[in-house]
Amino acid sequence: MTLKLTAGKEGTYRFSVAARPKAREKFRENNAESFRIEVLKILFIDEHLDWNTAFLRSLVKSSKRFKLSVVTWVPTTGYISIPQRKPWSFPDEGTLLSNYDIVMISDEMILLNKTSIVKSLKYYVRGGGKMLLLADEHSPLLDEESFSALEDVVPIKRISRAKINVSEFYPAVLGNAPLSPLSSVFSQCCANPKDIPPIPCIIGGVGIKSSALILLRVENESKDYPFLVVQDFGEGMSAVVLGFPLWRWKLAGEEQSNLYNRFFSSVFQYLAEDRKGSVVEVVSDRTVYRKGGVVGLKAFV
């Protein structure tokens, strides 16, 4: 179901969507869902800064909804915050991570070799936190020790030696793509998936856990591959993006640049929303808008 909302004035809105009860349905408490757009605090840890860091910071600056803290590692001083370049240390207690709605990790192997830090991440996720792993050349998903340390709180499992598959991967055509709240992320950009710059790398050698959900797929000439996978763990959720580098979209023109922003905004929104116990999921095609702006809402039952 697709809805259209025209904002009558600027400000914060609370949206409510309800599913019409079926005949003789007695339990109706979870037929409705309300949500409000709020500021999300995101911690991004990236050992090797690249275009992704710059473009994510740019996305956050253009939106009042996101607040991004970036941390990187330098050989001389260790971990520092960006852009202040102040020394930073990972909270050894998972409770301190709860200051962030989402913890996002890209190129990072050193950090995950410390038992106390891995323990904090697991505590954070199971206690209600949201973790997002972005694939990259130095992703912990490619390192056997790091992957094993996190495997019980990520939606994928190792089935062989992890590797980087190189090809031209395009968004899966509608017939092969899963129906999910993020299904429209690619279709809203270009009518033809081939118009989207291909993703050159996908992490292979991994399988999808039975309780995980594949939200998006990509494909090359021979087969399709999971691209975005999520799974609930305790009160929280973990997600992995298996393709990279996504920043190429930002360099390919206005439509593709908007795709990059829409993709990450939608993933952040999906992770941040509490869907437990609800039969209705709602995703908007934008999170910040001005008076008179038309916002597309998709409701999934």
Image: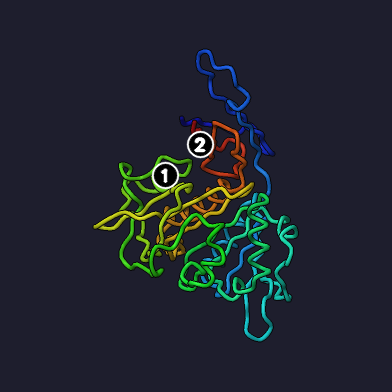
Q: What element carries label 1?
A: loop
Badge 1: few (under 14), some or many (20 or more) residues near its Cα, within 10 Å? few
Position of residue 28 measured from the top left corner of the image (x, y, whole percent): 60, 21
Depth check: give the residue in front, 170 or 116: 116
| Residue 25 appears left or right of 210 | right
Residue on which disc 2 sits: 296
Residue 188: image tag = 1
Quarter location, residue 37:
top right
Q: Name the secondary structure under disc 2.
A: strand
Q: Which residue is drawn at 48% across and 72% down?
A: 144
Residue 160 makes an appearance in the image: yes
Q: Where is residue 243 in the image (x, y as percent from the top left)?
A: 42, 61
Judge whether 75 appears above or below 21 on screen.
Answer: below
- Residue found at the very far left of the displayed protein: 222
Q: Check the image and report above or below for 223 versus 296.
A: below
Residue most extreme to the top: 24
Task: Tell whether 208 sits left or right of 60.
Answer: left
Give coordinates of residue 209: x percent, y percent. 45, 52
Q: How many labels, in total?
A: 2
Is residue 245 toward the left or the right of residue 28 in the image?
Answer: left
Q: Which amino acid does label 2 sit on?
A: Gly
**Which dot marks residue 139?**
none
Whether pointer 2 and pointer 1 mark residues with C-beta atoms closer than 8 Å, the reply is yes
Residue 154 percent location from the top left of the image: 53, 57
Relative to 280, is 115 on the left or the right? right
Q: Looking at the picture, does residue 70 appear above or below residue 184?
A: below
